[in-house]
Amino acid sequence: MKLSEAITLKIFKICDEKNISVNKLASLSCLTQSTVQNLISGKSKNPKLLTIIHICEGLEIPLKDFFNDMIFEDIERED
């Protein structure tokens, strides 16, 4: 699985657990809807760590918890 795909799956998983929409996530994370949409649609192939940090802050989870998931164990490089 590619990193961008894994990040998308993780975002959807957390949003589902917290019962929030992607638009609400953008608002909570102080990101534009287009930034979050590009991330989850796969348009953003190499998301910035700062974007992920904003998402974690919006979701009120530590960055290490975001990446502490089996989804991230076998990541393919996206060079």
Image (spheres, helix red, strand yellow):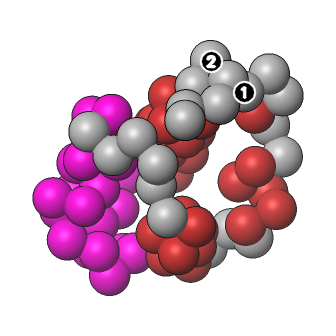
Observer-nearest of 29 and 44: 44
Is residue 19 at least partly visible in the picture? no
Is residue 41 at least partly visible in the picture? yes
**Residue 20 position in % (x across, y down):** 36, 52
Is mark 1 in CB contact (under 8 Å) with mark 2? yes
Identify the secondary structure beneath mark 1: loop
How packed is label 2: few (under 14 Cα within 10 Å), some, or many (20 or more)? few
Q: Residue furthest front?
A: 79
Picture layout, residue 29 above or below residue 40: below
- Snapshot quadrant of residue 12: top left
Q: CA distance from mark 1 to mark 2?
A: 5 Å
Q: Which residues are magenta?
A: 20-42
Residue 3: say if magenta. no
Label ID, residue 75? 1
Q: Quadrant of the C terminus?
A: top right
**Residue 59 position in % (x across, y down):** 54, 67
**Residue 26 position in % (x across, y down):** 29, 66
Picture layout, residue 17 above or below residue 62: above
List the residue tagged with mark 2. 1
Residue 40: say if magenta. yes
Amino acid type assigned to the residue bearing label 1 in the image: Ile
In-image side of 44 versus 51 (left or right): left
- Snapshot quadrant of residue 69: top right
Amino acid type assigned to the residue bearing label 2 in the image: Met
The first of marks 1 and 2 along the sequence is 2
Q: Residue furthest left?
A: 34
- Snapshot quadrant of residue 35: bottom left
